[in-house]
Image (spheres, helix red, strand yellow):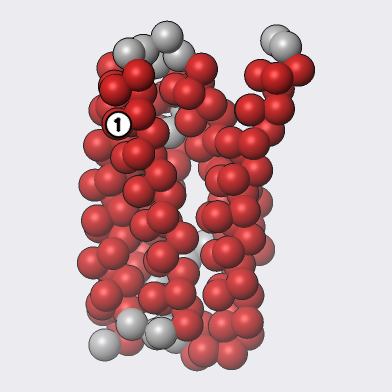
Amino acid sequence: MSNAKWLRLFGWVLMCLLVGGLLGSLFTTPAIPTWYSTLVKPSFQPPNWLFGPVWTILYILMGISAFLIWESGAPKKVKNTAIIIFLVQLGLNALWSPIFFTLHMLLLALVEIIILWIAILITMIKFYRISKPASILLVPYFLWVSFASFLSFHIWLLNK
């Protein structure tokens, strides 16, 4: 792979890590020892330390996935549409943390994560038509957001 391709791959991964990981942690980290610790959580709630590593891996996979679409030989219009949908779901991903952790709006966060889940599914379908590996790389993300949606529902239910 050429240096230019490595740089583009790095750019996609870095963008996902910055938008999702860094931006999300700015809203999340201050709330964990304060407001979030006061919430009633379901018995299947993973330990807090698990979320950072899982999301880091998922953002890396997302960046690789987007890179594969960007580098694909798909027609420009098809590729651009898939990338725009990817960027929309990435934006929705980043939006969840401030809604939940800063605004403390559990029901709105639940609605937002369901919309995110749908956007991920649409992204996977669009990516699958261009690159099966790119779509498959999003499966762990889709599964984790499915679990996070279930978790958000239960947190809302226990704290409404």
Q: How crowded is mark 1: few (under 14 residues within 10 Å), some or many (20 or more)?
A: some
Placement of 31 over or under 125, stated as above or below = below
Taking the view exactly as shown, the residue that stands out farthest to the front is: 76
Residue 124 position (above or below residue 112): above
Specify the quadrant of the image occupied by residue 120: top left
Left or right placement of residue 136 versus residue 25 in this view: left
| Quadrant of the rendered image containing residue 119 | top left
Q: Residue at x 33, y 82 (%)?
A: 105
| Quadrant location of the C terminus in the rendered image | bottom left
Closer to the camera in the image, 143 or 73: 73
- The location of residue 63, given as percent across then percent down, is 55, 35
Q: Is residue 127 above or below residue 22?
A: above
Q: Can residue 128 be seen in this view?
A: no
The percent coordinates of residue 77 (x first, y second) are: 29, 22
Inspect the image, locate mark 1, and give the three-letter code of the amino acid beneath it: Thr
Q: Decide if residue 58 is on the left or right side of residue 128.
A: right
Q: Is residue 146 left or right of residue 57?
A: left
Q: Which residue is drawn at 36% across and 48% down?
A: 89
Mark count: 1
**Residue pictured at 70% horizontal, 10% vertical:** 1
Can residue 9 be seen at all in this image of the molecule?
Answer: yes
> Which is more toward the observer, 33 or 112?
112
50 up-or-down from 26: above or below: above
Residue in the picture at 25% in, 57% down: 114
Q: Position of residue 65 (x, y in %)?
A: 49, 28
Instruction: Give percent across and percent down for residue 99.
Output: 39, 75
Which residue sits furthest right?
3
Instruction: Write down the residue under mark 1.
Output: 81
Regarding mark 1 in the picture, which secondary structure is present there?
helix
